Amino acid sequence: MNFLPFTSALTLILGALFASSTRAADVDWPQFRGPGGLGVGAIDAHPPVSFGPSTNVAWRIAVPSGNSSPIVWGKRIFLTAFAERKLLILAFDRDSGRELWQREIVPNKIEEVHQFLGNPASATPSTDGERIYVHFGSVGVLAYDFEGRELWRRPMALTQTEYGSSSSPVLAGENLVQLLDQDGGSHLIALDKRSGEVAWRVERPEMRRGFGTPLLWEHQGITDLVVPGTLWLQGLDPRTGTERWRVSGLARITCTSPVVGAGMLFTASWTTGGDRNAEHIAMPKFDEFLSEHDANRDGKFSLDELPAGPAKQRFKHMDGDRSSFIERVEWESMADIFARVENQAFAVTPNALGMLSDACVLWRFKKGLPYVGSPLFYRGRFYMVKNGGMLTCLDPQTGKPLFQEERLGAIGDYYASLVAADGRLYITSQRGIISVVKAGDSFEVLARNDLGEVTLATPVPLGDSLLVRTAEHLAVFRQKPNL
């Protein structure tokens, strides 16, 4: 029997281990914001700095509408979309953009979505390398194999928000977790990923409309399912849904997702009326308002009875049971939320037992907050982008700004989440300008790339490429070699 020299054998073993440990990071982007939901490309990823409709384009194809982001496994890209009142799941070849297959779902009714920016295909799919899992607020959760065969379907009621649903499914061991925070009937559900059967379900009546995506966090030998919600960030046991801890400080409506890094948990959220300034919303006492505006004296409010103002503007949000009336319990629940909310970012670390609480919060920061785009922890710094195109970078240990609300030179709203790779941040405006910013203590814009289309989906930095879904196209940008 022949034996390899020890050093050669060790080299082969380490090489195999290295290939195994980096494959998912280098080749795959299996869920919203990639591996771990962190928005960070692999250590050897090097997407281009400059790109656009006619610059460094590897391929660019027309796709149906949708706000979901693409995911990647091996040589396949998966995407959801919406066209002609049909919900679509599509698969593409990563190298060429060629469509491999398309599947259609015709729902009985389409969920209500934002009239300008909403789309019934807003949740990003996830995959375990064997199945693709998708959520549509008009249908429920479905699983497909890589050839497009439907494996199971878990029907769900229409999402009850006027903006539709967008929280993405997350794999947690043998379960698939879906967050459904809405105006009424909020809950978190875990489905067996092989059968679609319900593993557990947690009701969340105190959590109102929300759009963030949960995160799995491993620390101190514990795995927490970190779930954003109204006012509270919670840690649950992913096996049972049992709450382990909660920390206060989230917005009234949380659109962002948390991130982790260096043993810390970070989040940032903002919603109108939650800043402690002149624009802070405070609701009057129910009985006082009732005596003045309850025209028919039935003890509740119809839309017509409410005067112009914050309550009337948020009628659907408050009418959680869709009865067309706001009753005492609905009014007082919302009034309590407004009384307690304060928009902010914060960092928290677990105690010796792996538990978290308000006492574990390292810092809270209340400026430069994002509305929809999730923040980023990258190379020892915490970043967030505010609508209008203003970037803030904080020291993660102290919360002190390294730079604050620096203008990207690309105005407008920011709905895509921050991602990073190769020492750079990729920051996408709704107007379709992706600013590339150097990661570091000082602010430096390396490029502004105008895609010429509305862009709400989060880009994917993978290998030497950047994969971007715009309002009408799916494109891969790659630096062309200098000839």
Image: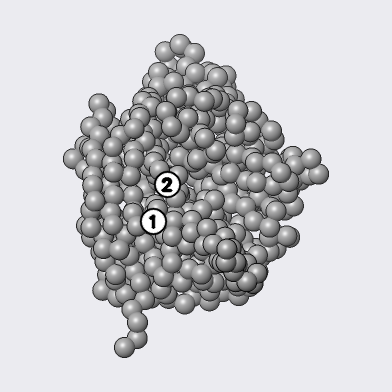
Q: Give the residue furthest to the left.
A: 84
- The image quarter in which residue 89 lies: top left
Which amino acid type corresponds to the residue marked 1 in the rendered image? Gly
- The image quarter in which residue 455 lies: bottom left
**Foreground pick, 127 / 121:** 127
**Residue topped by disc 2:** 129
**Residue topped by disc 1:** 74
What's the distance in space between the residues labelled 2 and 1, CA to CA? 9 Å
Q: Position of residue 474 (x, y in %)?
A: 29, 58
| Residue found 26% across the figure and 66% down from its top | 59
Q: Is residue 4 left or right of residue 139?
A: right
| Residue found 47% across the figure and 30% down from its top | 192
- Please tell me whether mark 2 sits on a helix, a strand or a loop: loop
Q: Is residue 468 above or below residue 332?
A: below
Instruction: Check the picture and name the quadrant holding the N terminus.
Output: bottom right
**Foreground pick, 101 / 451:** 101
Q: Position of residue 138 (x, y in %)?
A: 32, 31
Which of the two labelled residues, at mark 2 and mark 1, occupies the earlier sequence position? 1
Q: Position of residue 265 (x, y in %)?
A: 66, 50
Q: Give the residue furthest to the front.
A: 1
Local packing at callout 2 (Cα closer than 10 Å; few below 14, some 14-19, many 20+) is some
**Foreground pick, 172 / 261:** 172
**Foreground pick, 426 / 366:** 426
Q: Is residue 37 above or below residue 228?
A: below
